Structures are given as structure tokens and as C-alpha cells.
Amino acid sequence: MAKATVAAIITPDDERLDLILLTKRNVPPFKGQWCLPGGHIDDYETAEEAVVREVKEETGLLFREPVFLHFFNELFPEYHFHAVALAFYGKGIGSAELMPDEVEQISWVPLHEALALPLAFNHNQIVQLYAQQLAH
């Protein structure tokens, strides 16, 4: 059965919407690959609560008022992974901190560079849709 997950496109402020935060995974699947902060939605947790919690756990940032972007199917039979990812975007408040339990590296990346990286899961699709919305 598919799991529900969340992913966050985080910007440092309202002026630099083309600078996003990426994390390098410290856990399988996709260990060692860059991705957007996020994770599984816990039992009886809303998607909004989950994305705020996951951002805090992985980056130390407060992710207030996340805006829903779109949903993405994530089908990776080779990892026995099937999820529906709910993507959000918004501003991160505070200072980003490395949380080594789940993340081995954290970095603010220009959007054009993020688009060129091989991101984990279907996060390239999420970043592409975000970039398209910014262009309009």
C-alpha cells in the first residue's frame, strides 16, 4: 500500500525565491543523494503538520504557513518504495542546522543548480514545477 509523504521547497526569505534548501540523505533509500527536506506523514497528522515537523527535524528551521504545490507519485520498486508525495513551498525561519541522524549535509542552492542535480525520489519533478510557477 502507498504511503503518504511530504516534501518542502524552502526559501530563505520572500525576496530570494530562487534559492532553495537541499539536504543530503543519511538514510536509505537514496542514501548520499540530495533531496528536498521531508518525510512520512505520521498517524493522525495532517500533511501541513507533517511538513512543518519534518522541516524542523531535518533542518532546524520553522516552516510557517506552507503553501501546497502539487502531489507527485513516487514508485520505486527497486527500493520497495511506493508513496504519494505532497509538495509544499514557503519560507524557512531561523538558521538552518545540520541534523545528522537523517541528513549528512545541508546547503542553500540556487534554483538553476538544483534543477541540474540528480535529486532523490521524484524531487526533480517537484523542483521543476516550482521553477515553472516562479517563471509565471
Image (tube, helix red, strand yellow):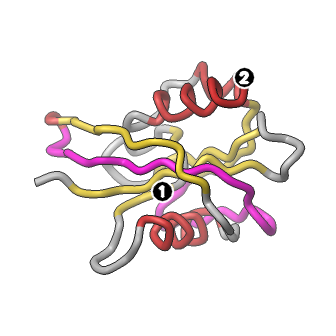
Q: Quadrant of residue 82?
A: top left
Residue extending farthest left: 1
Asked if residue 81 is among those painted magenta in the image, a careful observer would answer yes
Q: Which amino acid type corresponds to the residue marked 1 in the rendered image?
A: Gly
In the rendered image, the vertical position of residue 63 relative to residue 6, given as above or below: below
Circle 1 sits in a helix, a strand or a loop, which is it?
strand
| x, y percent for residue 84 | 29, 47
| x, y percent for residue 49 | 49, 73
Q: Residue at x 49, y 25 (%)?
A: 118
Circle 2 sits in a helix, a strand or a loop, which is it?
helix
- Relative to 95, is 80 on the left or the right? left
In the depicted view, which residue is nearer to us: 46 or 56?
A: 46
**Segment tinted magenta in the rendering:** 79-104
Q: CA distance from mark 1 to mark 2?
A: 24 Å
| x, y percent for residue 9 | 61, 46
Q: Which amino acid type corresponds to the residue marked 2 in the rendered image?
A: Ala
Question: Few, some or many C-alpha atoms within 10 Å of disc 1 (few <14, some 14-19, many ≥20)?
Answer: many
In the rendered image, the vertical position of residue 11 relative to residue 78, given as above or below: below
Q: Identify residue for label 1.
A: 38
